[in-house]
Structure formats: C-alpha cells, structure tokens
C-alpha cells in the first residue's frame, strides 16, 4: 500500500513539474482579428539597445494610431487589456508596450538600478518613431495611464511633432499633494466605517507622506473604493496571467521581478520631482481624463495642474462612475468620448 502511495506521489510530482515547465516556455501570442486589413501583433523589438515587447491590434491597420503608456511603475496592461479595448480596436490601431524592465520586457540578471524616467521617455519617443514607420502614420494619439502620464507628458513636451494630442488618464500631478488627498480620503472613509485601526494606521503615516517618503497604502485606498469601482483590476491580472495567451508563467515571473526592481526608484522620482514643475506647457492639445472617485491619483491634484498647464487646446474630463480606471470601468463611454475627440481634432488640425 505504501509503495502504491509513493508511486502515485511520484507520478503527481512529475506531472506537476512538466506542467510547470510547459507553462514557463509556452509560446505567447495575441489572437487574430478576422478582417482583411487587420493587424494583431505581439513581438519583441529592440529600442535604444533594450528589448521591448509591443502589442498592436486593430480591425484596420490604416486607422488612426493610439499608443498607451502603462502605469505602475512596472504594471504592464498587456496581460488583460484586450478585455476592455474591443470597441477601440474598431476605430483605432491600438498599441501597448511593456516598458524597459517591466513585464515581458524585463530581463533576468540585468541591473535596473540606474533606470530613470528620462530613459523611459527616450524609449517612448524611439518607440513612437518605430510605430509611425511600421504603420505608415505621420502622428499618433498618445495616452498615458497613472505613472504612464509622468512619462507621456514629458515625451509629448519633448517631441510634440510626433503626436496629434496627449491624453492623461489618472493624470499624475504634484504627487505629494495627491497622496495627502488620498490619505484624507482614507481617513474620512475609515471614520464613516468606524474602523479605528485603519484611522490610526493612516494617521501614523501622515508625516512620511507629507515629506514625500512614501505613498498612502494602496490596500487602504482599494479597500475604500479609491482604486476601482466597476471592475476588479487585481482579478483582471490573475485571469490574464492564467487564461490569456499574451503571457506565460515565465512572463509572470518577469512581471513580478520587474515591479520589485524598478518601482522604488521610479516612484521616488515622481515624488521628489513634481511633474508640474517639469512640464508647464504642451504644444499639442491635452486632455486630462479622471474618474470621479480616483484616489490613486487625485482629481483635485490633477485639476490644479490642469489649471496651470498651457496648451493650445485642453479639456478636463471626469467620468462620474469610475475611480482610477475610467478607460476600463466605463469602457463604452470612454470609447465614445475618444471617437468624438478624434473627430474634433481632425477638424482642428485642418
């Protein structure tokens, strides 16, 4: 009997090991779009001497190009984003990429200690040139999300001739002011909930947050609805990692390692070098897109930046049911808004 149990255990272990190995090396792809002039590409390219993974999707490759810059730092959206961009793919050729050191672009044993936002900006501008050449476009729409807005704003300021407009979703502004807004929100919500432990924990961190030494704990912001209202963004990652073909288990390890290796120094830059002091003017139209309940990057802080920003056209858009992910939480409304904005931009650019 014991011998039989040992054999079963051995076989089970071997099967588990084989499944794990298969998951680590399983080929990755993005599903095809069945239209005559469609594009559905997931590939690695070299940008500024570093490998970057790029995903390009759209029903018509001749449609206007929309390039997304993910947040985090390190939080690639490639694992799950197809779930939310079906409508966008009808009118735009949508480009996502994993930034240097993030997700599928992370390389084991590489030293990322010297990574800076300026290097990520250089990468973004070089990637823009690649995308424009690949798709035969003159300009593209640049959309940053969360930390991606810090990179996106600086790229738009440095290379405005490449972009038709800039869209900041969950726009970073004065990060310390934003974190203090987040802290106040958590304390207010914890007070309403009667959670003395959360109130005490948040209050203990006030001085560190005010000095720009740390963020308001994200688990508290999430607990009280300041991250997402209409989606479960953490679950989107889990299902994306497990069920979507763009990532395998090795890529999941890359994702985790990338966040660990790059998030600290890059967030320190965001806290110590406020974006409003670095980009005061854009030469292209600018749109700040916020969720009403966003306390990952606060609406109040973004509004203060928007009011000071000089741009030939600008608009501050608030989605009333969303938090930090209005492009996903209100997917259809966002797609309608973007379609309308593109039509307006076409008339303005003439």
Image (cartoon, rainbow, N blue to C red):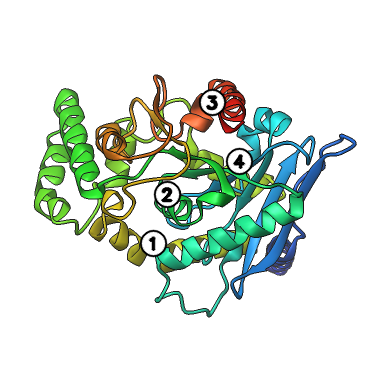
Q: Are marks 2 and 4 in contact (CB under 8 Å)?
A: no
Residue 72 vs residue 206: left or right?
right
Q: What is the crowding at mark 4: few (fewer than 14 residues within 10 Å), some, or many (at least 20)? A: some
Q: Can you tell which of label 3 and label 1 is closer to the viewer?
A: 3
Tell me which numbered mark, 4 or 3, is placed earlier along the sequence. 4
The residue singled out by tag 4 in the image is: 81
Q: CA distance from mark 2 to mark 4?
A: 22 Å
Q: Can you tell which of label 3 and label 2 is closer to the viewer?
A: 2
Q: CA distance from mark 1 to mark 4?
A: 21 Å
Q: What is the crowding at mark 3: few (fewer than 14 residues within 10 Å), some, or many (at least 20)? A: some
Quadrant of the frame with the N terminus: bottom right
Q: Can you tell which of label 1 and label 2 is closer to the viewer?
A: 2
Numbered badge on residue 145: none
Query: Residue 324, can we see it?
Result: yes
**Camera-nearest residue between 84 and 236:** 84
Residue at x 51%, y 65% (from the top left corner): 122
Residue 210 rendering spot, x and y as whole percentages:
13, 51
Kind of element beneath mark 4: helix
Q: What is the crowding at mark 1: few (fewer than 14 residues within 10 Å), some, or many (at least 20)? A: some
Image quadrant in which you'd find residue 283: top left
Query: Residue 5, can we see it?
Result: no
Image quadrant in which you'd find residue 346: top right
The residue singled out by tag 1 in the image is: 263
Tell me which numbered mark, 3 or 2, is placed earlier along the sequence. 2
The residue singled out by tag 3 in the image is: 334
């Amino acid at each position: 009997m014991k011998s039989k149990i040992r054999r079963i255990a051995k076989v089970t272990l071997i099967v588990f090991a084989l499944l794990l190995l298969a998951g680590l090396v399983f080929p990755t792809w993005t599903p095809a779009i069945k239209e005559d002039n469609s594009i559905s590409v997931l590939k690695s390219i070299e940008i500024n001497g570093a490998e970057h993974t790029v995903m390009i999707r759209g029903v018509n490759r001749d449609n206007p190009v929309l390039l997304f810059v993910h947040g985090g730092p390190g939080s690639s959206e490639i694992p799950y984003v197809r779930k939310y961009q079906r409508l966008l793919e009808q009118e735009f050729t949508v480009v996502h990429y994993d930034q240097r050191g993030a997700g599928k672009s992370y390389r084991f044993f590489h030293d990322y200690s010297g990574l800076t936002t300026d290097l990520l900006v250089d990468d973004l501008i070089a990637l823009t040139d690649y995308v424009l050449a690949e798709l035969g476009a003159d300009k593209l729409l640049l959309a940053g999300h969360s930390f991606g807005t810090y990179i996106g704003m600086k790229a738009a300021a440095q290379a405005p001739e490449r972009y038709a407009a800039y869209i900041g979703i969950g726009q970073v502004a004065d990060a310390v002011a934003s974190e203090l807004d987040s802290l106040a929100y958590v304390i207010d919500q914890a007070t309403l909930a009667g959670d003395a432990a959360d109130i005490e924990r948040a209050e203990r961190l006030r001085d560190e947050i005010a000095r720009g030494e740390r963020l308001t704990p994200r688990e508290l912001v999430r607990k009280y609805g300041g991250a997402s209202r209409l989606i479960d963004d953490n679950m989107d990652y889990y299902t994306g990692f497990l069920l979507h073909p763009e990532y395998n288990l090795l890529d999941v390890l890359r994702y985790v390692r990338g966040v660990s290796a790059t998030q600290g120094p890059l967030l320190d830059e965001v806290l110590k070098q406020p974006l409003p002091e670095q980009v005061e003017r854009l030469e292209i139209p600018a749109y700040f897109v916020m969720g009403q309940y966003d306390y990952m990057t606060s609406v109040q802080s973004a509004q203060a930046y928007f009011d000071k920003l000089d741009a030939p056209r600008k608009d501050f858009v608030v989605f009333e049911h969303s938090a930090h992910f209005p492009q996903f939480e209100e997917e259809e409304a966002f797609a309608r808004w973007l379609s309308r904005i593109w039509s307006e931009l076409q008339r303005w650019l003439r």
